[in-house]
Image (cartoon, rainbow, N blue to C red):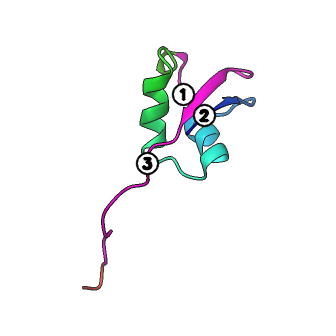
Amino acid sequence: MQQTAIARQGETLDALIHRHTARTQGNTEATLAANPGLADLGAVLPEGQSVRIVQAPPPQGSGINLWD
């Protein structure tokens, strides 16, 4: 799923993605790949920057159980 989002003042890419998808795992990498040159803007996105957010499929696996 893809959607377009506009960066708020002082917002990082991770915060923008989390605001729209509620998770960043895999989404940050997919979004960077879909937006050439976005990483060149720096850690804090310019206010009003349009970003095409790409949601990666949920991670597969059983996870980690610390008590087994």
Marks 1 and 3 sit apart, C-alpha to C-alpha, by: 25 Å
Give the Cα separation between the discs numbered 3 and 2: 22 Å
Q: Mark 1 touching mark 2, by CB under 8 A? A: yes
Q: Residues at badges 1 and 3 in contact (C-beta under 8 Å)?
A: no
Residue 61 is situated, as x and y percent measured from the top left of the image, at: 30, 64
Give the mark, 3 or 2, whose residue is nearer the N terminus.
2
Q: Residue at the far bottom: name it.
A: 68
Question: Is the C terminus in the top left, top right, bottom left or bottom right quadrant?
Answer: bottom left
Q: Is residue 34 visible?
A: yes
Q: Residue at x 52, y 19 (%)?
A: 38
- The CA span between labels 1 and 2 is 6 Å
> Of 29 and 10, which appears nearest the observer?
29
Indicate the secondary structure of the residue bearing disc 1. loop
Residue 27 on the magenta span: no
Q: Which of the two discs, 1 and 3, sits closer to the camera?
A: 3
What type is the residue that disc 2 sits on? Thr
The boundaries of the magenta stretch are: 41-65
The tag earlier along the polypeptide, 1 or 2, is: 2
Where is residue 13? Give x, y as percent: 57, 33
Give the secondary structure at mark 3: loop
Query: Which residue does the numbered mark 1 point to in the structure image?
Result: 43
